[in-house]
Amino acid sequence: MLRLTGVGKRYGAGGPVLDGVDLSVPAGRVVGILGSNGSGKSTLLRIMAGVSRASSGVVEGRPSVGYLPDRFPGGQRLSARAYLRHMARIRGLADLSTIDPLLRRLALVGGPDAQLRTLSKGNAQKVGLAQAVLPRPELLILDEPWSGLDVGTHAVLGELVAETRARGASVVFTDHRPEVVREHADEVHRLDVGQLTPSAAPAVDGAPGPATRIVLSGPGGDWTGEPGVRHVLAEGTRVVLTVDATSADAVLLRALSGGWSVREVAPCSP
């Protein structure tokens, strides 16, 4: 679908931001790129999205792209609905009926009529995410997509990533937290001072993958046997769940839909 060979990027006379990056993104794959601030993650995604050109190397493949930048330009007078309709028409989409349901699914504060300039960073991020997934692209590129989102939307974003992969499209996303990258990615790469290297696989064959600790309080009920739940501990009105990290978003969504309150979400110690 998309292949980068020896890709480099530099600005002016400064040192390289990217240096000899090799990366292949096949169809139906979720690729996570782990790196700290300043490592070159955003520059790499801009090149993959076609927003920026590489200074050296080769980029092969021309999939349709949905792109969420690290900073979504939300300071506009347009409403969320009007903005998404405008972007959909630019992409040649005739069916605009999915816009309002998507915004409701993302729980946009103020609803589809909210003006972009009134939105918080997290809610502007939701509109940016909606414009990226709306055209059902072949390659979905997300720059730090979980940053600033509320817990409920974390679960929805995880679902959108999984649904994109399920229909045979690919996802590339970045984050600076190893547990987030490994929870959602099929393969993980680390970007450090402009150089990309493969990282550990999300799970070891034959062994349990990473786990997440979720603390809930709410209406009661038995979580034993729920998909992805390894262990349940009831503590009065609280329930402590140990779940597969890859199932954490789905478990959180079920909890919130069932009237539970989320008190804590944290990776379990290895």
Image (tube, helix red, strand yellow):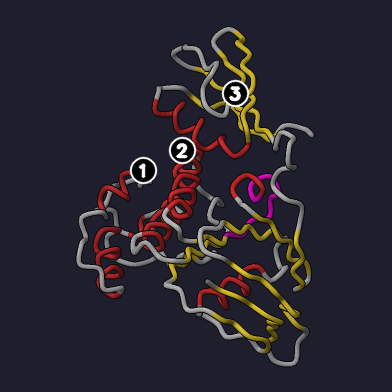
Label 3: state its secondary structure: strand
Please state the horizontal and vertical placement of residue 249, each as a whole percent of the image.
52, 38
**Would residue 207 be found to the left or right of residue 100 on screen?**
right
Q: Are marks 1 and 2 in contact (CB under 8 Å)?
A: yes
Sooner in the amino-acid sequence: mark 3 or mark 1: 1
**Which residue is located at x 40 percent, y 22 percent?**
259
**Which amino acid type corresponds to the residue marked 3 in the rendered image?**
Val
Neighbours of disc 3 within 10 Å: few (<14), some (14-19), many (20+): many
Q: Which residue is situated farthest in the top direction here?
A: 236
Residue of label 1: 107
Residue of label 3: 215
Sooner in the amino-acid sequence: mark 1 or mark 2: 1
Chain part drawn in magenta: 173-181
Please state the horizontal and vertical placement of residue 123, each as a whole percent of the image.
42, 51
Query: Real-space Cα distance between discs 1 and 2?
Result: 8 Å
Label 2: state its secondary structure: helix
